[in-house]
Amino acid sequence: MANDLSSLLAEGVILMSQPCESRKQVIHLLADAIATKLGLEGRDVFDAVMERENLGSTGVGEGVAIPHARIEGLTAPIGAFVRLNDGVDFDAIDGLPCDLIFMLLAPHSSGADHLRALAQVSRAFRNADLRDKLRETSTQDSVMAVLCPKAMAAANAAQASGMIATRIFDSVDQE
């Protein structure tokens, strides 16, 4: 599935509708959330992403921004996503405010992996249907279903297998 970001969000962070008024506030929010989850310093993540942001906008258009950076202490690329209540200015190429923000962090030494992950995220968010569905979501599970269909399918299959096994064991116990 071309739009599946399970590999980046399995250990990442998804935040639901958030009120933010600026690009810095959004980056700070995501940096703190992912740093807390990974045991990193939030300020280090924020500084690295802002350093990259100062080189050029990561607002890719259609209300999407993909701030990203390379960080010491990571072993694989990882993502954090937030849908904002109202878009903020990311100096996007189309001039539109951004309300769908996907922060991508990669190991400091991973040039090719970082670029592959960035291309993966960019391809996913080019899909208008995906963007529309994300703007309609109201729960983390619904965001996961849109961004991580492989992971959700696996979780549902595992749950269904567990339910089948439980029914089998229940019927054996009743005999």
Image (tube, grey):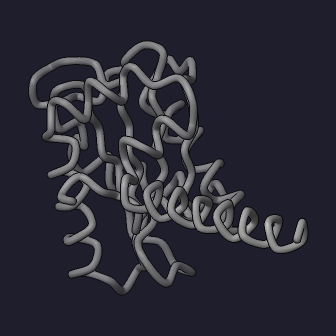
Q: Residue at x 59, y 67 (%)?
A: 161
Q: Is residue 22 above or below residue 80?
A: above
Q: Is residue 146 above or below residue 7?
A: above
- Horizontal side of 39 relative to 159 (left or right) equals right
Q: Residue at x 41, y 72 (%)?
A: 77
Give percent across and percent down for residue 23: 42, 30
Give percent across and percent down for residue 171: 79, 66
Q: In the rendered view of the protein, which quadrant contains the C terminus?
A: bottom right
- Horizontal side of 57 relative to 74 (left or right) equals left
Q: Is residue 116 above or below residue 75?
A: above
Can I make out residue 92 in this image? Answer: yes
Q: Residue furthest front?
A: 175
Image quarter for residue 111? bottom left
Q: In the rendered view of the protein, which quadrant contains the N terminus?
A: bottom left
Q: Residue at x 36, y 41 (%)?
A: 146
Q: Residue at x 32, y 27 (%)?
A: 133
Q: Residue furthest top?
A: 86
